[in-house]
Each structure stands twice: as C-alpha cells, then as structure tokens.
C-alpha cells in the first residue's frame, strides 16, 4: 500500500567563505553610443550570473540590460575574481560591478553638470539619459555625455572597483566573530508516497521558500531553486558512489550512477521571500548552493511521516526503506500486547 507523508527541512547558509579574503574586481566602461562594457573575471556555468551582473551594471548606469556587454573569465584581460564558488557571485562580484559602474557614472555627472547648469549631486541616470532630479525634461543622452567626457574633458567614463566582504576573524578561545558578511535562509516541504511493501519512494511535490535578499532576476532565482531541488532529490533517493573491496568505484558512469531526470521531477512550487540586504548590490544576496540544502532533509522527514521509519544514511533507496519497515514491523511483533 502506498502511504503519503509530508516533511519539512530548514536551513541557513553563508554567502562567500571565510578564513581568507575572497574579493572580486571589475571594470565598467561607458561607450560613446550609450552602451557599456563590463570586465569581470567570474565564470558563467549556466546559472545566469552574467545576466544578473549585466542587470546590476545597467541599473547603476540608467541603461537597459541589453545595452551591457560582459567580458568574462579571461585572465589575460579581465580583473581578478575569486571564483564562481560559495554562492558568492551575485553578492561579491555584483557589489564590485555596482561600485565600478557608480564610479563611471560620477564622471558622467561631472561632465553633464555644466551642460545642464546644475551640480553633479543634482543629477541621476535614468532611461538612457543623465537628467536633473525632479526635472527629467532637463537631460542629455548618456552617449552624448560619454563622448563629451572623452573628447572635450579628456576623461573617459571608466570605473574600476574591487569589493571584499567585511568579516571579523574568529576568536580562537571564544569562537566569537563574524566569519561571513551575510546569510540566506530557506524552508522546503516535501510530499511523498512510500510503498510500504517495496520501499519505493515517489516525490509528489516540493514547496520551496527561499530568502535570497532582493531578487535581481526572479526567473533565474526560480530556475536556480528548481535545479537545486532536482539535485536534492538525487542526493536523497538515488545518487550513490559504490566501491569494491579494493576501493575501486564500480559505478563510474551514468549507466549505473543513477541521477534524476525530468521524468523524476515532482511539482515544484517556488516562493521567493523578497527581503533587502543593505550590504548586497541593490539588496541582493545569493541562491546557488542553498537551493539544494533542505531538500534531502525534507524528503526523509516525509518518509518518516508516511511509514514511521527514520533513514539515517543517504540515498534512501527502496532497499533501505523496505528493510527499515521490516525491522520496525518485526520489533512491533515482539512487543507485549
């Protein structure tokens, strides 16, 4: 008989890493046609980071994301970046790009101020123009201002910056300190069906609620969470490295190292908790690795809710679940009436 259960998993996760510094650097150049070029050493591995970083630069410069060209991951030409690790790209690299874009924007403001007969502090960048705050009709196109900065003032609108998360070293005696600049939080709830005869587990639905600061690109956040859930399902139920007596892996390929496919995916409902982190670029933090952390815990808790057995080693294969159910039933039979 199939029995249904629900389980919850909660987590908090640090952004970046500690012990040593993990800075990022960036260069932002505003071109004479009103577009911008961003140089960053970070790597796009399919998570959509370059899209988000382009959006951050565009927001700071008052232009469209399509007007930003990203040059990345070329150590010959791009500035240093610690790496696309520790879920740090949006938070750390994004802050470096934001500051670099703001530095380039300040040159535009200094150039446009005498053109518009105001102080630089009275200007803002919006809708591809440098305009007077509160008086958008008094404005000049960003491309025109960029060209004037270069050919008249001799100061091309170029900004560079680096950013390293502020931390406090751990006290070796008390353990007190601030090893990370910020944290993200999540709760996931899993609904599963467990066959109490075979031990087979089917994940029916996952509800995932994640606080990742202000989402720069909500669609990419949803994709990251759905991908993390897929990895979490594999971690919970299928993926296992097997070794023989001599320590050689006996399932070193995708023929017998089982991973979930699209057919194994349940319904996934993603809830983005829109918070604001004042230390992040426009309030953002990150959502990479944290997206898979609560999934396995939620699933094994759901198995317990369904059939009353605790699985304490992963993956929770049908054989393990069935053996646990049999052991429970045997123990119950031995109890006095």
Image (spheres, rainbow, N blue to C red):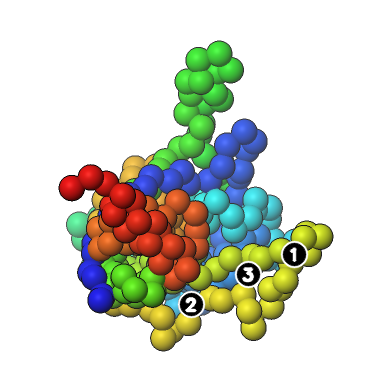
Viewport quadrant of the N terminus: bottom left
- Which mark is first along the chain, 3 or 2? 3
Q: Mark 1 or mark 3: which comes first in sequence?
A: 3
The label number, if any, that marks residue 244 in the structure image: 1
Quickly name the residue at label 2: 260
Q: Is residue 150 left or right of residue 335?
A: right
Q: How far apart are the alpha carbons under marks 2 and 1? A: 24 Å
Whether 192 is drawn above or below 328: the answer is below
Closer to the observer: label 2 or label 3?
Answer: 2
Q: Secondary structure at mark 1?
A: loop
Mark earlier in primary sequence (2, 1): 1
Front position in the image: 26 or 187 = 187
How far across and how far down the image is residue 137, in percent?
23, 68
Establish if 271 lies above or below 281. Answer: below
Q: Look at 65% across and 60% down and name the residue there.
A: 41
Element assignment for label 3: strand
Residue at screen point 26% across, 75% down: 2
Q: Which mark is residue 71?
A: 3
- Whether label 1 touches label 3, CB < 8 Å: no
Image point (68%, 55%), residue name: 79
Q: Position of residue 289 (x, y in %)?
A: 48, 57
Contact between marks 2 and 3 (CB within 8 A): the answer is no
Left or right, residue 242 beside residue 76: left
Residue placed farthest to the top in the image?
Answer: 173
Q: Position of residue 176 (x, y in %)?
A: 47, 20
User: Viewer-proximal residue, 253 or 17?
Assistant: 253
- Secondary structure under tag 2 reads loop
Q: Position of residue 154 (x, y in %)?
A: 62, 58
Distance from disc 2 to disc 3, alpha carbons, whole Å, reads 34 Å
How packed mark 1 is, by other alpha carbons closer than 10 Å (few <14, some 14-19, many 20 or more), is few
- Observer-nearest of 327 and 101: 327
Q: Report whether residue 114 is seen.
A: no
């Amino acid at each position: 008989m199939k029995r249904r259960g629900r389980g919850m998993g909660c987590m908090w996760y640090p952004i970046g890493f500690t012990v040593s510094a993990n800075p990022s650097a960036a260069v932002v150049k505003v071109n004479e046609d009103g577009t911008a070029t961003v140089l960053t050493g970070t790597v796009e591995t399919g998570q959509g980071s370059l899209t988000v970083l382009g959006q951050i630069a565009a927001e700071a410069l008052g232009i469209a994301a399509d007007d930003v060209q990203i040059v990345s991951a070329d150590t010959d030409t791009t500035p240093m970046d610690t790496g696309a690790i520790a879920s740090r790209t949006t938070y750390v690299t994004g802050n470096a790009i934001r500051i670099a874009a703001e530095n380039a924007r300040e040159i535009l403001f200094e150039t446009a101020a005498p053109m518009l007969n105001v102080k630089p502090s009275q200007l803002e960048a919006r809708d591809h123009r440098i305009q007077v705050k509160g008086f958008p009709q008094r404005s000049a196109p960003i491309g025109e201002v960029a060209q004037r900065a270069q050919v008249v003032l001799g100061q091309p609108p170029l900004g560079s910056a680096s950013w390293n998360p502020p931390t406090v070293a751990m006290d070796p005696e008390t353990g007190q300190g601030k090893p990370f600049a910020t944290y993200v939080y999540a709760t996931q709830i899993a609904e599963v069906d467990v066959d109490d005869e075979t031990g087979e587990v089917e994940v029916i639905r996952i509800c995932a609620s994640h606080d990742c600061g202000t989402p720069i690109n909500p669609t990419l956040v949803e994709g990251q969470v759905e991908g993390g859930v897929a990895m979490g399902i594999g971690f919970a139920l299928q993926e296992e490295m097997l070794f023989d007596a001599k320590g050689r892996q006996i399932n070193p390929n995708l023929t017998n190292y089982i991973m979930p496919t699209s057919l194994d995916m349940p319904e996934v409902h993603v809830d983005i908790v829109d918070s604001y982190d004042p230390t992040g670029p426009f309030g953002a933090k990150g959502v990479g690795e944290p997206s898979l952390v609560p999934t396995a815990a939620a699933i094994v808790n759901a198995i317990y809710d369904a059939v009353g057995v605790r699985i304490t080693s992963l993956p929770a294969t049908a054989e393990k679940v069935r053996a646990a159910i049999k052991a429970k039933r045997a123990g119950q039979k031995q109890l006095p009436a």
